[in-house]
Amino acid sequence: MIRLGKQLEEKSRELNYSYLTAPPSRSSSLAPTHLPRLKTLSFWTSVSPLPFLQIPLPFPPLKLRLLAPAMSYSEVDASSLTLFLPRAAISPILAVTLIAFSVLWFFPGGIAWALSRAHACSIPGPSGFVSALSGSAAHRVLAGLANSHKAIDLMAFSVGFTRFVVSSHPDSAKEILQSSAFADRPIKESACELLFHRAMGFAPFGEYWRNLRRISSTHLFSPRRVTAFGERRRAIGEQMVADVRDLMAKNGAVEVKKVLHVGSLNNVMMNVFGRRYDFGKGEGSELEGLVKEGYELLGLFNWADHLPLLGWLDLQGVRKRCRSLSKRVNAFVGRIIDDHRVMGRISGGVVDGAGDFVDVLLGLEKEEKLSDADMVAVLWEMIFRGTDTVAILLEWIMARLVLHPDAQSKARSEIDAVVGNSRPVADADIVSLPYLQAIVKESLRMHPPGPLLSWARLAVHDAHVGSHFIPAGTTAMVNMWAITHDESIWAEPNEFRPERFTEEDVNILGSDLRLAPFGAGRRVCPGKAMGLATVHLWLAQLLQSFDWVPADGGVDLSERLRMSLEMEKPLVCRAVPRC
Ligand code: HEM
């Protein structure tokens, strides 16, 4: 029994409380002044890396883990030593609770799986809660766990009360992505508050979602539209080349992502809204602010999505920020829709092939017609999905080319051979540049922009993956990063070697799950052709115009997973103009 301060012991007797105790070494700092605080401590939030709790019950000692990472060790140190409960209540309730909790906690796959109908489930996985998704290297942590639990094919785990499975193998990945059972997406609170449940990416699988896919694949992502936008894409690429020249003249180095971000945002704005923006001033800077805040909110790991009580409390302030952002987005995009309505009336409502996506949505009729609120959601999502991924992928590619001058000069020689130096490279040349395409594939393999999270799918009904039973409501993910770094699938997976894709033709659009950076199945990325056309052309333009060499700080390939997998330290390098 521990040495409690005399006063404290007396007080506990006086109040008729029982106590749970910790070893003597931890009790020395316990003072009577702790009493009010101790009484308010809930059992669930107080347990620390405590060794053993002794309790006056016919109950074996229990080893419990920290559940409240927000509490610092020093806070926990004294206060977690003793838990006071009315003596009458402690025995049966606490005993049952502790037994139940430890059974749930140590269940393979964790608490959420223990509470599911899949009690006979044989999917291996870590017990307790996995907090990896809140970190910036979730794809690596999950790959490590899958290895250590021998659960490459499928691993079960719990995040709060959410049940997850993750596949790190092409076969089970294919089953998940191509099965109609996993055609839904789990909706986060932030996405819902930002109205994204009415946009294509988060809309539940059903008629509304099908309608959006049909409209966008006909009017925004069709090969004809992608080709028709080639000239605008080239003009934006040329503007980026001019910006790089200016920045080099001014600073002697370029932060590549800044230039790429403005270019991609303008590219999407041209396709979707039919206009460009001057970033850094007026409406342009307002738009930048909205997009930045949206990225942050959607990329944030929100515990409220997995612990319902926290959802109510909004401790991270996500709901509040989302509501404020959604008002500003509604006003901004609503204004653009109104402008298009006015212009439509003036021109007699004629939308020809060159009209933008807002015109297309306004021109829909009967059952296809969308409300203004739905239009805002759909348009806003395109900006998000289209900008981030393209800029991030191109930054990784440029980083790799700065680090691998041999690959860079091989790609440039290919461009020179096909295009020469008398005219600028164009969309139509890309098909004749296989090595450049191989560089893009190899970069997608090493640095998939959506290694994990943008892939999440929700089981709409009970299903099987292999022999494993997956109850409806389970969130399923594919760890594409783990697959593309698996040495049983890719020889020397950590080596940047574009040649592997000239030696073997690998389809990256969703039919070969060894490398499917755009997903697969019904919810495969609809913007893949547009995204790839943009990345190929801009890469060719940047290589045709400059030699890219390291700046003084070199290249740091550390990564950080937010909404997408980004470079943690922005690439800064020198672009030497070619004569
Ligand atoms: C390099 C560029 C891109 C990459 C790597 C990428 C990757 C992805 C991935 C991994 C998914 C999830 C697929 C799945 O669940 O199977 C996705 C979905 C989606 N992407 Fe992309 N994407 C890119 C460009 C774009 C562009 C340019 C747009 C539009 C302007 C876009 C719009 C979407 C939409 C709307 C969805 C949701 C589809 C649905 O749930 O039905 N993406 N993307």
Image: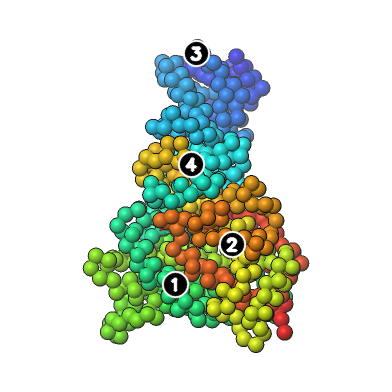
Crowdedness of circle 1 by 10 Å Cα count: few (<14), some, many (20+)? few
First in residue order: circle 1 vs circle 3: 3
- The answer to whether 519 appears left or right of 484 in the picture is left
Q: Residue 517 at what x, y percent from top left?
A: 53, 58
**Distance CA(mark 2)–CA(mark 1):** 22 Å
Q: Residue 510 at what x, y percent from top left?
A: 49, 57
Q: Quadrant of residue 398?
A: bottom right
First in residue order: circle 3 vs circle 2: 3
The residue mark sitting in front, 2 or 4, is: 2
Amino acid residing under circle 3: Leu
Residue topped by disc 4 = 165
Residue at 56 percent across and 38 percent down: it is 151
Residue topped by disc 2 = 505
The residue mark sitting in front, 2 or 1, is: 2
Residue at 60 percent across and 52 percent down: it is 484
Q: Secondary structure at mark 1?
A: helix
Q: Secondary structure at mark 3?
A: loop
- The answer to whether 575 appears left or right of 156 in the picture is right
> In the image, which disc is placed on residue 57?
3
Most distant residue in the bottom direction: 422
Amino acid residing under circle 2: Asp
Quadrant in which the C terminus is drawn:
bottom right
Asked if ligand 1 lies within 8 A of label 3, the reply is no
